[in-house]
Amino acid sequence: EVTVGQFRACARAAGLVTAAEREGGGFEFAGGWTRRSGWTYERPQGQPAADNEPAVHVSWHEASRYCAHVGGRLPTMAEW
């Protein structure tokens, strides 16, 4: 599990802006996928998250960039 603080450090070092940040918010499944304005990895439910909370509203590509930044990788489908 990657924390908000860990992901923030990577994002700042790499100049990474997430899709949720660029596109105005992340998604929640509530009877269908609904974009929630302002929801990002730093504000998972519209409120600031503590550094030790899990990072959410991150795409596969963003998670992959984080893994590469810290010298790791995402699991393969077989490993998952």
Image (cartoon, rainbow, N blue to C red):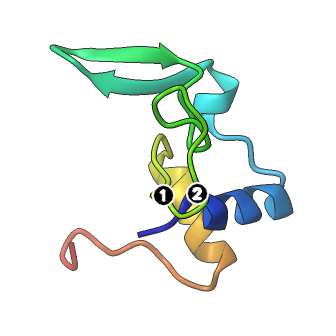
Report the quarter where the C terminus lies. Answer: bottom left
Q: Is residue 78 left or right of residue 42?
A: left
Circle 2 — which element?
Answer: helix
Sequence-first tag of 1 and 2: 2
The residue that mark 1 highlights is: 53
Give the x, y percent position of residue 39.
53, 27
**Residue at horizontal 45%, vertical 52%?**
60
Give the x, y percent position of residue 3.
53, 64
**Residue at horizontal 72%, vertical 65%?**
10
Examine the rendered structure and indicate whether residue 15 appears above or below residue 39: below
Give the x, y percent position of residue 66.
61, 66
**How far apart are the two marked residues, 1 and 2, measured between alpha carbons?**
6 Å
Q: Quadrant of residue 49?
A: top right
The residue that mark 2 highlights is: 4
Give the x, y percent position of residue 45.
46, 30
* Closer to the camera in the image, 69 or 31: 31
**Residue at horizontal 59%, vertical 21%?**
38
Q: Is residue 16 left or right of residue 3?
A: right
Report the quarter where the N terminus lies. Answer: bottom left
* Closer to the camera in the image, 22 or 47: 47
Asked whether disc 1 touches disc 2, contact meaning CB atoms under 8 Å apart, the reply is yes
Q: Amino acid at mark 2?
A: Val
Q: Amino acid at mark 1?
A: Glu
Q: Is residue 11 left or right of residue 39?
A: right
Examine the rendered structure and indicate whether residue 14 appears above or below residue 17: below
Query: What is the number of the mark on residue 40?
Result: none
Q: Quadrant of residue 18?
A: top right
Circle 1 — which element?
Answer: loop
* Closer to the camera in the image, 39 or 67: 39
Pointer 2 local density, CA inside 10 Å: few below 14, some 14–19, many at least 20 = many
**Residue at horizontal 82%, vertical 56%?**
12
Examine the rendered structure and indicate whether residue 57 appears above or below residue 76: above
